[in-house]
Image (cartoon, grey):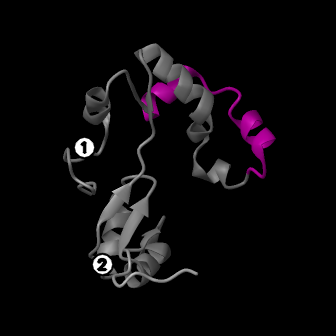
Amino acid sequence: MFELPDELPPIVVAGSGGPSAAVTAELGDGLFATEADPDLIAAYTQAGGTGPRYGEVSLSWAPTEEAALTSAHRLFRFSATGWKVQAELPNPVNFEAASAVVRESDIAESSRTAPTSGAIWRRSAPTPTPGSTTWPW
């Protein structure tokens, strides 16, 4: 049996544009986004959203900077293609084909790779406040 807790947990809803930001503001307790888009944040707050805002940050930790970058390239190179391409790819073989020309240097520009957590924090943008649970955007 599953019983609901006395106090329900917050439900944070993903948003990606104006219409979804309005739904998120109406139905969710917070906003989750894959990028720090000022227009998305404005749409969310203009629609009445007051909850926390969370953002995805691509990062890779390894004992060395080079190993972290190699890992990020191996696991996340599809991210360099952008959402419009990713939304059209039906399966892993298509992701592999679409990202075959992505170089490690391409990933270095968009991912945070480092051998220490402190270095990853310093490279994160927008910069979160250490110890905070939300991003300042």
Q: Tell me the quarter of the image containing the C terminus.
A: bottom left
Q: CA distance from mark 2 to mark 1?
A: 23 Å
Q: Is residue 83 above or below residue 71?
A: below
Percent of width and height locating residue 44? 35, 73
Q: Is residue 52 visible?
A: yes
The secondary element bearing badge 2 is classed as: helix
Q: Tell me the quarter of the image containing the N terminus.
A: bottom right
Which contiguous range is marked in magenta?
89-110
Using the image, tell me which numbered label, if any, was put on residue 46: 2
Instruction: Name the image quarter holding residue 9.
Output: bottom left
Q: Is residue 31 above or below residue 78?
A: below
Kind of residue sitting beneath label 1: Thr
Percent of width and height locating residue 117? 31, 30
Q: Nearer the viewer, mark 2 or mark 1?
A: 1
- Which numbered disc, 2 or 1, marks the residue that appears first in the sequence? 2
Q: Main secondary structure of the magenta part?
A: helix
Using the image, tell me which numbered label, if any, was put on residue 55: none
The residue nearer to you, when weighing 87 against 128, is: 128
Report which residue position mark 1 lands on: 127
Kind of residue sitting beneath label 2: Gln
Q: Is residue 72 magenta?
A: no
Residue found at x 37% / y 74%: 10
Residue found at x 40% / y 84%: 26
Percent of width and height locating residue 31? 38, 67
